[in-house]
Amino acid sequence: MQLGFVSAILPDLSFEEIVQFASETGYDCIEIMCWPKGKAERRYAGVTHIDVTNFKPADAQRIKAILKGTGVSISSLGYYPNYLTPNAQEAKAVTAHFQKVIKASAMLGIGRATTFVGRDWTRSVDDNWPRFRKVWKPLIKLAEASKVRIGIENCPMLFTNDEWPGGKNLAHSPQVWRRMFKEFPSKYFGLNYDPSHLVWQHIDHVKPLWEFRDRIYHAHAKDVRLDQDRLDDVGILATPLQYHSPKLPGLGDVNWGRFFSVLGEIGYHGPVCVEVEDRAYEASLETRKAALRQSARYLRQYMP
Amino acid sequence: MQLGFVSAILPDLSFEEIVQFASETGYDCIEIMCWPKGKAERRYAGVTHIDVTNFKPADAQRIKAILKGTGVSISSLGYYPNYLTPNAQEAKAVTAHFQKVIKASAMLGIGRATTFVGRDWTRSVDDNWPRFRKVWKPLIKLAEASKVRIGIENCPMLFTNDEWPGGKNLAHSPQVWRRMFKEFPSKYFGLNYDPSHLVWQHIDHVKPLWEFRDRIYHAHAKDVRLDQDRLDDVGILATPLQYHSPKLPGLGDVNWGRFFSVLGEIGYHGPVCVEVEDRAYEASLETRKAALRQSARYLRQYMP
Amino acid sequence: MQLGFVSAILPDLSFEEIVQFASETGYDCIEIMCWPKGKAERRYAGVTHIDVTNFKPADAQRIKAILKGTGVSISSLGYYPNYLTPNAQEAKAVTAHFQKVIKASAMLGIGRATTFVGRDWTRSVDDNWPRFRKVWKPLIKLAEASKVRIGIENCPMLFTNDEWPGGKNLAHSPQVWRRMFKEFPSKYFGLNYDPSHLVWQHIDHVKPLWEFRDRIYHAHAKDVRLDQDRLDDVGILATPLQYHSPKLPGLGDVNWGRFFSVLGEIGYHGPVCVEVEDRAYEASLETRKAALRQSARYLRQYMP
Amino acid sequence: MQLGFVSAILPDLSFEEIVQFASETGYDCIEIMCWPKGKAERRYAGVTHIDVTNFKPADAQRIKAILKGTGVSISSLGYYPNYLTPNAQEAKAVTAHFQKVIKASAMLGIGRATTFVGRDWTRSVDDNWPRFRKVWKPLIKLAEASKVRIGIENCPMLFTNDEWPGGKNLAHSPQVWRRMFKEFPSKYFGLNYDPSHLVWQHIDHVKPLWEFRDRIYHAHAKDVRLDQDRLDDVGILATPLQYHSPKLPGLGDVNWGRFFSVLGEIGYHGPVCVEVEDRAYEASLETRKAALRQSARYLRQYMP
Amino acid sequence: MQLGFVSAILPDLSFEEIVQFASETGYDCIEIMCWPKGKAERRYAGVTHIDVTNFKPADAQRIKAILKGTGVSISSLGYYPNYLTPNAQEAKAVTAHFQKVIKASAMLGIGRATTFVGRDWTRSVDDNWPRFRKVWKPLIKLAEASKVRIGIENCPMLFTNDEWPGGKNLAHSPQVWRRMFKEFPSKYFGLNYDPSHLVWQHIDHVKPLWEFRDRIYHAHAKDVRLDQDRLDDVGILATPLQYHSPKLPGLGDVNWGRFFSVLGEIGYHGPVCVEVEDRAYEASLETRKAALRQSARYLRQYMP
Amino acid sequence: MQLGFVSAILPDLSFEEIVQFASETGYDCIEIMCWPKGKAERRYAGVTHIDVTNFKPADAQRIKAILKGTGVSISSLGYYPNYLTPNAQEAKAVTAHFQKVIKASAMLGIGRATTFVGRDWTRSVDDNWPRFRKVWKPLIKLAEASKVRIGIENCPMLFTNDEWPGGKNLAHSPQVWRRMFKEFPSKYFGLNYDPSHLVWQHIDHVKPLWEFRDRIYHAHAKDVRLDQDRLDDVGILATPLQYHSPKLPGLGDVNWGRFFSVLGEIGYHGPVCVEVEDRAYEASLETRKAALRQSARYLRQYMP
């Protein structure tokens, strides 16, 4: 396994600086954010550490040159928009951009792209399914052709009233994953497994590793703290941020020892990337860097 | 406290027969269903053991005569429609009917009416609020004038995709109750407390008794069994019947000893009515009667 | 479901007296022990409440006459020897006797016979398998022909050094049951499910009900108390009675509410028979009767 | 075992009436309060159902006559003052009265007397010891001579600031019991075991039964509910009623199934007497009687 | 947050040496003990790393010079006597000395002084209150004038019979803290929060952070191991060291991940100082230094 | 305490290389495997880092020279065969070899030898005892004469059907240890305590440290993960590897904080050696080295 981080937390640094920071801090890899340049639409989105819009072999050469000799690699190109948004124009644009992400990943020889499947959050899983099938068929074709494995993060993308009721990503539970992989059995379609989202959904966050062992292509190391006193007041029908908080690894309820224990046992040898979304560490670039240093110290006791 | 049951489970019996059954079985009281005559709209609804449509003093006399000497009383008149349904005509009709329920309760000298507050299930709690305020203001006025205390059951009325996402009753959590009672501080507006709905919402099902001790006007004794193995597959974003089952008291996860311990301690002296919605006991009238007998045996160890 | 008891605990009473006791105590049925007359080979064995050795239609008539009008029925004929004992002569004899049990059950119109599959306790499960296959093939054939469903109790029959290491009954875990039913898919071959034996094996004692819902033909209500302080001294490699004790229902670690909750949910409508093996109640006939009265009081809160 | 109750909860009834109530309610025995006539010094104290002050054979005959044929016996004569109070005059008086209790018990052929050892609550256990030794030596001598076994209840007698810091009874923990029985190994000196006091002391309330199996001469069935939310505010250094409440059996945290399971296993065949100190049931004689009826229903599921 | 340690564990080192050790070991700060020179009255007391008795600007300069460039700062000046001791002369002396501590803290620009409020351990909280109010009024005035925030450690100072029954510091529970801050709402009066003392008091050691978020001015990182087997023998009425042991962080029952998770979330940015009172590490200066090194390794996984 | 590792995991390195690796990785000591040269009989066995077959003072000198100045010492000479195997010739050979191990340990001034007691796995503990007594008497004599303390590892040596039913080492539980030390009270006969084997035996893995505090001469740091889902299928009568997996420290169910907390408290100052048997780290020499690095990082947070 390789320890990495998601570059979204360091939007103020350039690609070069991020690689440099990773190298100094003892990280093995980075999931690089590849949003199109422009204004972010939500917290942690809109970061562009590699611009894939007009990506050419020379760009790939430049990036490889920067990485060379640092001991740091790119675990994946990440882009997390909503392909199934009710806004048809937006849906078309983000789908087109993800195709560029896939192609850039191939050109860079990374072989992974990480994202969501999206969701029309006003509609049920069933009601989203026909559109999911239609939108994703060509994307998976492209992934196969490009030999790039797509890792779908299992975040429900449901936090506050803004995403109520359904959230902006269908892929939130083992039940849905099973249905997704039945729909598209392609080996280029899998998961970017993040245990933290399972915790607040009251799903065992380690058990699914056994069943989906062949579909885990990337992993996120984020934690969450569930506050039972708050849950006792609002219940699970409330919007999730009313009763839980995203935290650095070790500051929440994920059982990391058990997580890495089983992850190793199923033969996973890929990247595990720290995703920082802990508001207690967002004050400045320095505190965000400190968050990454602390996370590495914490996780290295469970990782080679 | 008095042990009772909700009459909805015995739709095939007349009022007289129900009273007779209660008396034989050792029940102290009954919550009598007062739906308008006609077709039920959902399971357990549409039962009419007292028809309040055109209720007159003579009707009240007849009912009192039936009860006399049986040792059985009526704990409340119950009617559980959706006053905030998007169907304006239906909303108007059910609201008008509830006014008749309140008046009948007053005429019978019961002093309690039990119901939901309703909800437009397609909209958030905030978005429902203005209409809630408008619809309930006159109902509470009537309750005050009639000296009938309204007990709102805390069932989210969310089971399957039919009620997704919001359910058909706003009053599902302590947070919402607090807001309701801030909106309407009237002493004629309170709760019909059912601990089982709190269990699957992952809310402590005993703790709220302390804060809302002055608002508990009626209580339901229903149980639910949470199946963690199923929850591990679907998570809390699934529709609730995918991971829990309504059960008879003692066959689920409610801690009845603790429930009655605190219920007694806060000075509650009112009715606790068994609500049978356990599919394992629905095969016949006889099995439904057996369910009520078993529930009484179980609960009497915790009640006077 | 019907509440019954295993007749082995009342060896000093005749069949008539047992039926009388059951009727007075509110039991619905009895599992009648049918050992061949003679000396018992171990505690709780060797009891003959119906002698099937030379069973004729007239015997069946006599038994039915005794039961008539008592409200008590026979849930099963029970006989629990070791068909796979290394002692070939004994194996032959007990197998022959079980055939008589099956035939008597058919003649009495009961349709159930309850037993173990046996085991050569000095050998592993795998090493026992060929003989299990050979011995049970004709027995299941006979059961099919007689339309008598065989319920195998899941007791490992391992208590002290006498049965070390393997115990005298192969059918001790879901893994083995699955293998048994793969070997013999006959609908006349199923389980006499006793949750208590799963408790000390550290197996969830309710979960298997879901998978084996179509194979549960009879059930035993026995409890066990696991003593962690003793287990902390000897560990699970010790003989089981060093760390647990058989107890009456309610005096051990079985979660009876959950057990009956799921038993009802899977549609089980058969007998549940109290099996008394609690040494604290063995002093006299009167204390053993008291054990059955207490068990009925305890279990009736969870049963119709 | 015999199910009984402590007569202190029914001060308004005469001895005859209490026996009558016990008989009707299905109780096997009663622990009879024998305070000297006069004003009670604290809640639940000062009750005189048998006046031992001037007890004569004729009194014993009268009492036996009342019991005859009722199926009810006296489990013990109870008197619970503070023999080690700093008030020397009071200490002398209560000690003298307990001698009368012992003698009356002998005359009635009961053979048990139940009480506390007392404590100067302003001083530590060590500082109380010399006086404990001195006061109890003659009492135990008398008990031996009278063949009356003394059962010391393990209540710390610490509730509010009135008994702060030490409480009015030394015998509160296994550590102290061991020291007591080392001091006085007499077989006429033992425990009146009440599991509830161990619960709020955070002592396993079943485990000590094993070590002290030969010293348990009487038992109380009382329950307590520990309120963790309150404990989280005040901690264990607060006076105990700030974080726990005495309750009827089944309405608190005692594990009654396990308690009776081990009680039976250690061979205890004596009385278990319900002690009602639950304020939710103190409103009237009728509610206190209801408390005893409910307690019997609850406990009979675990007792013969 | 800054990681520090309490200097009391290194009495054999001079101030310069301690700063040097902190710097080498990766500590950010030190809570410096400022007892008056002389003989220690109890374990861990009586250490003088800065002598404030006759503290002058030149002393402050000298200290600042030593710190300069080391990366180490002083988190607070600490002095932990009993201001409310029954010994009036001692009380007067220690109060006078704490005034010098406050003034020195101001002169050094530290702005924090850490201590206890004290207690007459033979009397109840209520009985101590008038004197607490009288003694602390002028101290808080001085703190305000000096702009030095006082952090009261929440140690009950109750270990063995020496401090029985009340301990030597009133500030032991959230209930008492609330009363203290109601008495003195000054923003210069707050807590030196140590989670370990809450553990053995059976108080949630993280929950109070939410309510007292504006009062936490300093924190101690000490752990305790609660031994349930011992508690099962002696109960919570025993002196606390009979059932728990102070330990290094990570070797006890404090949930450090959750502690730092909430500490960060409430916006705490101050010092967290390791307090070593673990007897297993007291053999020599070298083992005590090793304790501080180990504690830093352990805590850094949860801290920036 | 000293942190070490068991050399068996690095069979491809020479003694010099192992010492070098330990020194670089921050290990204080190594338990050196001393199997006779030749083919390994089972996984992790058969490793010879020091050949004691013909061990002479010059060999000792050479070894000491290699260690000199590295900061690394030898914690023990380890050899783990089965002295009680039914194969008499093998038993004789391995017993003879262990005598050489003891002598080499003495010559090297180490003073410890670590091993099993062995077991005829087809027979009960009782049946093995006479032979255990006979075989070990002379070995303990030799140990005493050589002043070498023998540490018996508490591994049951039961994994799969190969060692069924009894395993190849009697010393598996506190009950057996007590018996062993009663048999041989020699201070040269003690334990090589490995908490992981207690976990899957459902024995508290910390509690025995108190009782056996004077017998712990060496310790292994291995972890195991118990998989309840698998245990729910097979139960404790299955062979142990069906429901648990050996893992690196931190990746299993051992509570390391509590383990080291009590280990320190009982005054243990000896070696704690990481034993790597985690299949997820066995791919290559590099992954096995990584396992040792990770284990050191994990354990150092709990150790000086």
Image: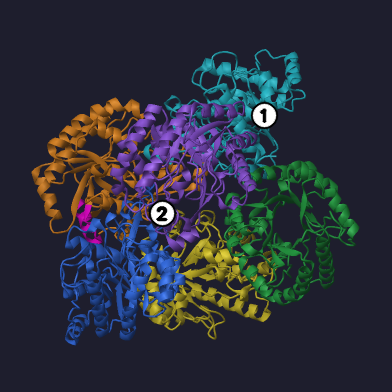
Chain colours: A yellow, B green, C cyan, D purple, E blue, F orange
Chain of the residue that carries numbered disc 1 in the rendered image: C
Up/down of C140 relative to B228, above or below: above
Residue positioned 36% across, 46% down in the render: D89
The disc placed on residue D144 is: none
Is F22 inside the magenta-drawn segment?
yes
The disc placed on residue D163 is: 2
Q: Does A118 sit left or right of E289 as displayed?
A: right
Tell me residue C156's x, y (percent).
Answer: 51, 31
Residue positioned 41% across, 27% down in the render: D147
Front of the two marks 2 and 1: 2
Classify mark 1: helix, strand or loop.
Answer: helix
Up/down of D259 relative to A28, above or below: above
Other-residue count near label 1 (Cα within 10 Å), few / some / many at <14 / 14–19 / ≥20: some
Q: Is the magenta stretch mostly helix, strand or loop?
A: helix
Which residues, given as a range, are shown in magenta?
F14-29
Mark 2 in CB contact with mark 1 (< 8 angstroms) = no
Up/down of C32 relative to D132, above or below: above
Image quadrant where residue C53 sits: top right
Chain of the residue that carries numbered disc 2 in the rendered image: D
Other-residue count near label 2 (Cα within 10 Å), few / some / many at <14 / 14–19 / ≥20: some
- Identity of the amino acid at label 2? Glu
Which residue is disc 1 drawn over? Answer: C25
Residue A166 visible to the viewer: no
Is A304 inside the magenta-drawn segment?
no
- Identity of the amino acid at label 1? Thr
Q: Nearer the viewer, residue F24 or E116?
A: E116
Tell me residue C250's x, y (percent).
Answer: 56, 38
